[in-house]
Image (cartoon, coloured by chain):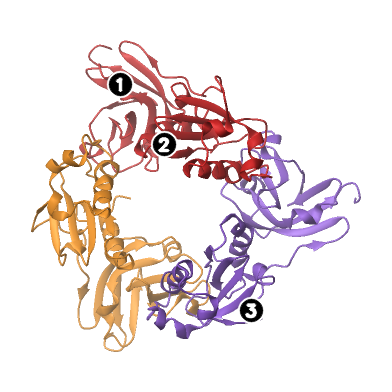
Chain colours: A purple, B orange, C red
C-alpha cells in the first residue's frame, strides 16, 4: 500500500491497452484531505487523473496538457460537499464520469500548470555495459518487475541480471526454464523481470519492491 | 464470513451512492436451504433483496414497502428447480435481473409483510456525554469502523474515542496524523472510525469487529 | 496456481449459466511461449478458447467443433507482435472480442482438428456400490469439491463419503448441519462436496485438491 511510484508504473505501462478516450483514475494517496492538488492530464487521446504526489510523474513530462483541478467548478457539477477522506468516490469518480460522458473537457475544469510534484524514483542509471534499476512492483505470481526498459539493454550481447547476490540468465519465456528455476526475461510490459518458473521469485529470493537490479553485459563487461 | 450485520451496515451506508432504480442483492446466508424467507423491499426508489435473517433490518424500519417472496411465482418466471445451496445464483440473481429490466415489480412477486427477523446489533447507547457502540466492520486497510453515526456526537465539544483500553483524539483526516500514529475520525460513510496513519489499526491494536467503542466528551464529561 | 484441470472443472460446470453466444476464455498456461497450440471450440452455441494443455479436455469430447488457431490469420486481424509471455492479453483477448462482436467465426481463424492433449484427470472409477474420485478444487469457503457427479450415486440408498480417513453423511444443505460439523452434499454445480457448516472443511481436515474421495453405499455395501 501507499507507494505512488508503483501505481505510476502500472498506469504508464498499461494505458496503451485501453482505447483512446479512456479516463484513467489512479489514487494512491496517503495525503488525502490535506492540501495537495488534483492533477488532470491528457496524452495520446487518454485522460489521466491522480493526486499531485508524484504518482503521474512518469507520464507528465511528455503529456499533451497538464492541469490542476479548479476546485471552484465542483459545485457547478453538483459535487457539493465531498467527504474529507474519500476523494476517490466523492471527487475523482464523478469528474471521471463527466469526462467519459463527453460533458466536460480539461479546459472546463482545469488550470494549466507547468510544474508538479516529481516522481519518487530515479530513472535507471545507464553506462556502456551496465544498467542500475530497482524492483518497482511484484505481481500476483511473485515476479519481480524492474523499471529497466528493454531498450536500455538492446545493445547488450549477453545480458546478466543481478539481484540480491544472485545472477540470472535471460530467457525468452517462463516455459524455457525448468519448474523451480529462476530466470530473467523481458516481460509483457517491456521491462526486465526476475521470475521463477511455476513458482514465486519474491518468496524464493526474499526480495521485494525497492530491491536494486543490475544488468551487465557478460561479453563487453566483466 | 457469515456475519449478516456487517453486510447490513454496508448496504445501508452505501446504497445512496447508486442511482435510483438500482437493485441491491445482499446474501450472507448461513441458513440457505432451510426455511427462511426471502425479503424484497423498496426504499427511495431502490430495490433490496436479502434472506430474512436480520441482514436488512437496519433498512426495513423506514422502507417504503416490505414483502416476502411468493415462491409460487418462480416457475412462471422460468425459475424451476433451484439448487438447494446457491440461491444467490438460482433465485436472487434471475429475480434481480427481472427487476432491473423493469419486467416485474414488488407486487408481482411479493406478499406484503409487517414483521421480519430483527437485526443482530443493538443501536448505540446514547447519554448526554457518552455513546457506546461497537466495531461493525474492518476495511481492507485495517480501519476499525464503528456503528456510531456522526449525528450522535455532534454536540460533543471534545470527543475522545476509547477502544481496547486506548484513547484516541479525533482528527479530520488520516493525513493529519503522523505515519504510525492512531487517530479517530468521521469516515466517508458518516460514522466514527479508528485508524492508523499509513498502517493497520486492526493489526496494531489487535481489535476486530464486535469490539466495544465508547466516545466521551472531554469537556462535559470526565 | 498452474493446475489446468481445476480451470477445466469450473468452465465445464459453469458455462451453462451464461447465455448462448458467450465466449469463454480460460488460460492456465505454464507453457506460455512454448509451442503449444491454442484450441478454439464451439458447443451449445458457446465458444471456448484455451491453450492445448488438457484444460478443455472435459468439454472437447462432445463439442460441436474443435479447431486449433491458425496463427497466420493473426496479422490480418491486427494482432502483429504479441509478447512472448502474455498471450491472454495479446492473442486470446483480441480474438475473443472479434468472436463476441460477431466479426469472425471458428472457420475464419481455426483449422479443424480431431485430437488434442488429453485431460490430466481420470474420470471417477465406478462400481456397483462405490465411486472413487478426487477433490478437484477448493472454493473460497474451504469446501472440498470433488469430480463425482450426482448421477454416479443416484442409485445409492445411503451414500457415505470418505475423505482423509473420515466418513461423512450426506445432507441436503449446509444449514442442516450444526455449526462446526462436517457434512457431504450435492453442491450447486451438481457434484459431491465435503463441507463444514459455518467453517472451512479444507482447514479442518487438512485436505486439499488432489485428495481421494470415496463414496460407498451403506445399504448395498459394507
Q: Nearer the viewer, residue C170 or A147?
A: A147
Residue at image x 47%, y 28%? C210
- Residue A113, how many percent across, how many down? 62, 82
Q: Is residue B100 visible?
A: yes
Q: Chain of mark 2?
A: C
Give the CA separation, mark 2 to mark 1: 21 Å
> In the image, B85: left or right of C214?
left
Question: Where, quadrant-wise, is the C terminus of chain C in this rendering?
Answer: top left
**A206 displayed left or right of B117:** right
Give the residue number, with chain letter if any, for mark 2. Answer: C138
**Residue at figure coordinates x 67%, y 67% from the top left:** A58
Tell me the quarter of the picture where residue C151 sits: top left
Chain ID at mark 3: A
Question: Mark 1 falls within which chain?
Answer: C
Measure how far apart labels 2 and 3 are at the Cα level. Answer: 48 Å
Instruction: Please tell me the numbered disc located at residue C151.
Output: 1
Same subunit: marks 2 and 1: yes
Question: Crowding near pointer 3: few (<14 within 10 Å), some, many (20+)?
Answer: some
Q: Disc 3 designates what residue?
A: A116
Is residue C84 or residue C205 the one in the foreground? C84
Amino acid at each position: 500500500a501507499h507507494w505512488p511510484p508503483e501505481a505510476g508504473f502500472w498506469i504508464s505501462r498499461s494505458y496503451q491497452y485501453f482505447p483512446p478516450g479512456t479516463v484513467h483514475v489512479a489514487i494512491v494517496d496517503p495525503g488525502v484531505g490535506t492540501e495537495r492538488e488534483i492533477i488532470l492530464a491528457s496524452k495520446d487521446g487518454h485522460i489521466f487523473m491522480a493526486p499531485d504526489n508524484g504518482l503521474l510523474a512518469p507520464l507528465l513530462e511528455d503529456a499533451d496538457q497538464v492541469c490542476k483541478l479548479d476546485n471552484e467548478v465542483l459545485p457547478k457539477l453538483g459535487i457539493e460537499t465531498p467527504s474529507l477522506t474519500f476523494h476517490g468516490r466523492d471527487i475523482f469518480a464523478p469528474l471521471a464520469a463527466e469526462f467519459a460522458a463527453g460533458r466536460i473537457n480539461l479546459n472546463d475544469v482545469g488550470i494549466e500548470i507547468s510544474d508538479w510534484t516529481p516522481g519518487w524514483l530515479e530513472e535507471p542509471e545507464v553506462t556502456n555495459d551496465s544498467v542500475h534499476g530497482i524492483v518497482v512492483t511484484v505481481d500476483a505470481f511473485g515476479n519481480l518487475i524492474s523499471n529497466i526498459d528493454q531498450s536500455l539493454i538492446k545493445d547488450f550481447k549477453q545480458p546478466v541480471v543481478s539481484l540480491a547476490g544472485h545472477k540470472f540468465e535471460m530467457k525468452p519465456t517462463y516455459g524455457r526454464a525448468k519448474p523451480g528455476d529462476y530466470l530473467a526475461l523481458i516481460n509483457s510490459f517491456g521491462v526486465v523481470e526476475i521470475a521463477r518458473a511455476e513458482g514465486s521469485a519474491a518468496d524464493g529470493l526474499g526480495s521485494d519492491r525497492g530491491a536494486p537490479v543490475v544488468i551487465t553485459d557478460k561479453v563487453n563487461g566483466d
